[in-house]
Image (tube, rainbow, N blue to C red):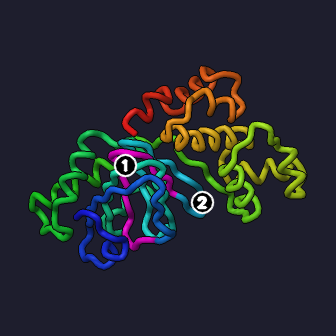
Amino acid sequence: MRDVQPHEVETTPGPFVAVGARYGGGHHVARHRHWRAQFLYAAEGVALVDTDLGNWVVPPERAVWIPAEVAHEVTMLAPVDLLSLYVAPSAAAALPQACRVVGVSALTASLLREAAELAPSPDPGTREHLIYSLLLLEIGRAPELPLNVPFPGDPRLAARCRRYLEQPSPHQTIDDWCEELAMSRRSFTRRFRAETGFGFAAWCRQACLLAALPRLAAGVPITTIAFDLGYDSASAFATMFRRTLGAAPSRFLASV
């Protein structure tokens, strides 16, 4: 199924629906939710998935898993070729219960392309049903990647985190945040770590990393990005990038 609208997916019967669509850079899919879980794969391009609990960046040849009923919106940070598998809760019980970005094997990508040509309600034991079943097994085995920025549950903290993600600055300190939020340093530190799983400095580094990805996709020079994010050199930024994501910036987004 190609170029299917979200409301059409919702009304299509069956435990599985696989669809494909191509979007231009800057295209935005407004906040919505599905009664099925969604495995959203970026065959090309970069997408940003925004939820109440955090942001997830989906680079080329990676995917994000979105559990059923999680409200989300999607922004295309570059021209994107997307493939999505929607899975009914009864079939997704063994799969993750929280959003995550994962690596996608060549087998999984091939199965997704094949599934996009299949009917959504295959009979058990048929080739079509086996393809969907193997896809679920491969999704369950996919390695999680550190491409998310979690938001705290506290609304004020979450709002402050969103503002930082929109415009990261190496000059902001934990004391600046504490003063703005009228919190003691001790209370802020304890609550921030409890609600995000990160210390403040580590969270800021992660936010800067994800903020860099769409700029890299847009062709902004690495040196410019490195200096904007407070790094002393492009090589220092590249070292951090490689340590976190396993590849140099130029290679990581080579297919954008």
Q: Is residue 136 above or below residue 211?
A: below
| Front label number (1 vs 2) | 1
Residue 97 in percent (x, y) is at 46, 59
In the image, is 145 to the left or to the right of 89?
right
Q: Which mark is residue 42?
A: 1
Type of amino acid under label 1: Ala
Q: Is residue 14 above or below residue 146?
A: below
Q: CA distance from mark 1 to mark 2?
A: 21 Å
Residue 111 in percent (x, y) is at 21, 50
In the rendered structure, which segment of residues is drawn in magenta? 33-49
Q: Within the magenta stretch, is there residue 230? A: no
In the image, is 108 to the left or to the right of 70?
left
What's the residue at 18%, 71% (across, down)? 121
Residue 62 in percent (x, y) is at 39, 44
Front position in the image: 215 or 51: 215
Q: Is residue 178 visible?
A: yes
Specify which label sits upstream in the sequence, 1 or 2.
1
Type of amino acid under label 2: Leu
